[in-house]
Image: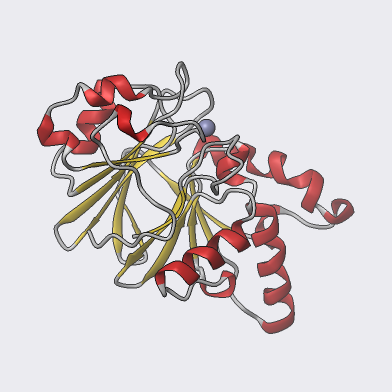
Amino acid sequence: MLVVGTGDAFSTKLFGSCCVVEGSKGQVLVDCPDSIHRALQCASDQSGWKLSIPSLQDLIVTHLHGDHCNGLESIGFARWLLHRNHGTPLPRLHCWKPVANRLWERLAPAMDQGGKAVLKDYFEVHLLDPDREAHIAGISVRCRPTDHSVPTIALRFQHAGKVLAWSSDTPFDPDLIHWLEVGATLIVHETSPPPTHTPIEPLNALPESIRSRMRLIHMPDGFDPSTTTIPRLMQGEVITI
Ligand SMILES: [Zn+2]
């Protein structure tokens, strides 16, 4: 996994929380915040990975808050042009039904080209189903709704016996923690002010057996790392699961 952004929606220093997960058959961008082109370039420069918009074939969007999906417009246009001019396949966009149902409502005012374009001119939408395992880039992917303020999914990526768990945006939820942590190699958990996000205190109170596998993301600019022993993810960091 390459960590691309670790900030919250209001950060003046960090990109919005997102990462690229690499499987045996390709790479998956998990969430698509503002300035996604620059975020991917910075992560490439820091890590040595060669990320590029033309080569990203799979995107997952966990929910429709702007700090997780505002980059879809620029990726969509970039790939639409490549598709039109060079025949490059459109990217697959994986999301669950409540997001898919309103995705075009979110994008159309900027992308409908006077009523001539529709969502499938930009993205090949694939539905994630909480009751089913999906297979993306050679990785088994499961999702589960979280109790965020808009429909949102947490994720588990399983590949070669290793599991990366991704809380996405969520209030503190012991049931979600359990779903994330069972068998997980690495648990990426958000922390931001409640009530729609998870403050650091309940994460600090989790058993060591869970905290030792946990890393933090989606931190406000003023987050004080001395308030916890759970390490933060760093932009540009590569973690082999
Ligand atoms: Zn959110």
Q: Spot the residue most to the bottom.
A: 86
Based on the displayed image, in which of its 4 quarters is residue 113 positioned?
bottom right
Q: Is residue 76 above or below residue 56?
A: above
Residue 227 versus residue 219: which sits nearer the camera? Answer: 227
Q: Spot the residue most to the right.
A: 114
Give the residue displayed 36% in from the left and 66% down from the top.
137
Residue 144 versus residue 129: which sits nearer the camera? Answer: 144
Residue 41 versus residue 32: which sits nearer the camera? Answer: 41
Q: Is residue 137 above or below residue 12?
A: below
Which percent across, then down, holds residue 10? 60, 34
Which percent across, then down, holds residue 39? 56, 59
Q: Spot the residue most to the left.
A: 209
Q: Spot the residue most to the top.
A: 195
Give the residue displayed 41% in from the left and 38% down from the top.
168
For the C terminus, which image quadrant? Answer: bottom left
117 on left or right of 1: right
89 on left or right of 161: right
Give the residue displayed 41% in from the left and 75% down from the top.
48
For the N terminus, which image quadrant? Answer: bottom left
65 on left or right of 30: right
Q: Which colour scheme is used?
A: secondary structure
Which percent across, then down, holds residue 218? 45, 38
